[in-house]
Amino acid sequence: MKAYRASLLWFSPHSEGPAHALFEEDGMLVVGPDALGVQVVQAIGPWRSVSAQYPGMAVEHLPGRIIAPGFVDLHVHFPQTNVIGSPASGLLPWLENYTFPEEKRFAAPEYSAQAATFFVAELLRNGVTTALTFATSHPQSVNALFTEAQAQRLRLITGLCLMDRHAPGDLLNQGQGKRSGTEQSLLETEALIQRWHGVDRLGYAITPRFAPTSTEAQLRGAGDLAAKYPDVWIQSHVAENKDEIAWAEELFPFSRSYLATYDHFGLMRDRAIYAHCIHFDDNDRALMRSTGAAAAVSPTSNLFLGSGFFDYAGADRVGFQYGLASDVGGGTSFSPFHTMLAAYYVGRTSVEGLQTKQGLSLSPQQLWWQHTAGAARALGLDGVVGNLLPGCEADFVVLNPKATPLLARKTSIASNLDELLFSMVVLGDDRLVERTVISQAI
Ligand code: GUN
Ligand code: ZN
């Protein structure tokens, strides 16, 4: 058992609609093992009342610091760390000119291993303690990432990138002997599920890159695996870019929409996370809601690649789940603060002639929830991560609101919780995260 005395930020249980943050200026957080020996939150609340329940307990005092849930990144690409900041006219040329050439390098296990070490460290340095992550089409990249995440106890979900057409030959899933690349990719997916899913804090995601780079046979096989393993995750991309959508619709002319293609192959259900979900109509939104799939909203990526603006009002009107994601390397930062600020900009967008006329102001509590408890809920990990309610795994960040002169100046004049959170959302980055604490197992 271990206790911390600091300011505490967390969320009320099962926040529906507008998120409701809880804040304790002088709080106490107690963590200790659950029945399986995994460190979880035992108690949280005001210092005065919680400390009275744990007399004589050793307490680490962190004056002036804020303890908050570790962030959940709903969509990030481990092999794209080096791709950050590569400009292109849009998604498809960006993939062809920068992303595919870099991903080819992950065929080498040593290249994958050093990239995994950097990637996991960078997530943790930025306060991310759970991530749903793309790897490459090489099983060695998946093994390298799981191995490093396991060593650091990061809660990580990843999977073999399925792509058996429309990409450079050496990046497509490779066949073996008489088996085609398609067959081999599905066998490898199942072998990787059996090796990694549910081991320590690791989870597997069936990962068709996006419909245009998979044959119907591969999507069908992926859907069959999803039915066979109902508690693994599914991740892909959808409706990010107009050229991509036109291409997907040309390749799957029988589908009502690009999104509906995934449903056709059994790839929409709880624990299915689709990145972007920008250019949707209400039928698509209703399909998200009725299947239980969730969107990974990736605002820095969407702004950088000029993809468009996630329609928050549309999502809330129809009522499907979503959470925030960095989408590095289309996204420009590992920092959840940068992502929350970009989401705020997107919510504000009200530009004549663009797809959305939002004019919405997302509150800092909503933004923070979307990157913690809300993202956890989208993953089906409500009450497990992304919050500090009793029973949640003890993953948290220690924030120093005086980390820079400007942060110190601005946070010191905050007169309510929204002002304090907004100062951190707007001015924060990795310097704000003094420490990231990961739930240990005894
Ligand atoms: N669509 C298919 N692949 C990708 C990718 O790597 N990044 C983004 N942003 N969109 C994609
Ligand atoms: Zn992506």
Image (spheres, rainbow, N blue to C red):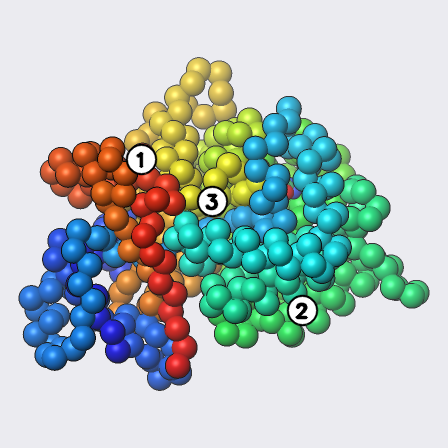
**Do residues under tags 2 and 3 come within 8 Å of each other at their CB atoms?**
no
Q: What amino acid is found at the position of numbered circle 3 in the picture?
A: Phe
Number of labels in the image equals: 3
The image's mark for residue 192 is: 2
**Do residues under tags 3 and 1 come within 8 Å of each other at their CB atoms?**
no
Q: Which residue occupies the foreground of this view, 23 or 55?
A: 55
- Visible in this render: residue 281? no
Ligand 1, seen in the image, is in the quarter at: top right
Of pointers 3 and 1, the one earlier in the residue sequence: 3
Q: Is mark 2 within 8 Å of ligand 1?
A: no
Residue shown at 18% from the left, 34% from the top? 409
From the top left corner, tell me how far across and down residue 305 is, in percent. 57, 30
Lateral position of residue 189 relative to residue 116, left or right: right
Q: What amino acid is found at the position of numbered circle 1 in the picture?
A: Leu
Residue at the spot of label 3 = 334
Residue shown at 48% from the left, 40% from the top? 333
